[in-house]
Amino acid sequence: MNKKVIIPIFAVVVLLLIGVVAYLTQSLNEQKTINAEMQELAELDKMEMENEYQQFADQYSEMKTRINNDSLVAQLTKEQLRTQELLKELKQVKSNDAREIARLKKELATCRAVIRSYIIEIDSLNRLNQNLRAENTQIRGQYEEANRQIEGLNTEKASLSEKVAIAAQLDATAINLQMQTSKGKTAKKLKKCRQFFVTFNIAKNVTAQAGNKTVYVQIKTPSGSTLAVAGSTAYENREIQYSAKKTIEYTGQETPVGIYCNVAEALMAGSYRVSIFCDGNLIGSRTFTLN
């Protein structure tokens, strides 16, 4: 083959390879970011549990200084050692060990109930002692401060959860609206249109939940009304009308979708807005000018 032909072909191949590598690198980086956010969310959950276990252990120490009942002190010491042992186990568990985290959460709920019962019992025994009441107020203050710290962790965790939820939302791309005659052929003029054919792609999203998805198409006429109302669906705490719907199987990969919408009314020239909804979210929209 002539060298003058080979060189341009080689250059095109190199450019294509560079483009593919760049796309794969971007996708990998996006996935790493999402994985990092989910890992950080798990770490925050584990940190919150450690904070509460430590808080309970400290409270047992405080409670033992407020009583002179040897039997009750022994019980508190036993529960304190158990709490410290559970805290030790939690610190050794990896944040992605879901089974162990779930078990230690159940243990934490039991510890919470036990310590509350002891607080009630001790307060009852010492309710006539003003000094111990003051110390109890101090303990409650420490408990409230610990709760504020936990609330701070919860707020940060909720923020990360919201980011993950946003990343899992679907996205409709390449939205197109085609006018068709009653025989399914392309209509060149609006007056001959008897149905609309809406096509689009559900973009690839590895974080979205796979399975059957119901996709709703809403077509707004130039007057602002919904064309060919077929029903309603939930969106932003309210019900909106849609023109057509279709259930598809989504695997996380890019999925082409085509939906027909029959027209039984006279159409006016102007701007028609096509909006796509799925899982209660607006996943794409586009406006078309039809004559």
Image: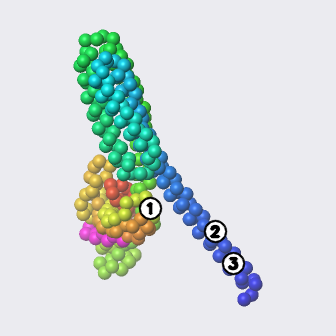
Could you say which quadrant of the image residue 61 lies in? top left
Which amino acid type corresponds to the residue marked 2 in the rendered image?
Ile
User: Which one is in front, 58 or 13?
Assistant: 58
User: Which one is in front, 225 or 143?
Assistant: 143
Mark 1 and mark 3: Cα distance apart in space: 33 Å
- Whichever of labels 1 and 3 marks the residue nearer the N terminus, that label is 3
Residue 128 location (% of width, % of height): 25, 12
Which amino acid type corresponds to the residue marked 3 in the rendered image?
Phe
Q: Name the secondary structure under disc 2.
A: helix
Q: Is residue 235 visible?
A: yes
Check disc 1: other Cα within 10 Å, few if <14, some if 14-19, many if 20+: some
Per the image, the residue denoted by label 1 is 206
Check disc 2: other Cα within 10 Å, few if <14, some if 14-19, many if 20+: few
Residue at position x 41%, y 43% in the image = 89
Left/right of residue 261 with respect to residue 85 in the rendered view: left
Residue at position x 28%, y 24% in the image = 72
Foreground label between 1 and 3: 1
Q: Which numbered marker is on residue 10? A: 3
Which amino acid type corresponds to the residue marked 1 in the rendered image?
Val
User: Which one is in front, 68 or 170?
Assistant: 68
Residue 79 location (% of width, % of height): 33, 32
Check disc 3: other Cα within 10 Å, few if <14, some if 14-19, many if 20+: few
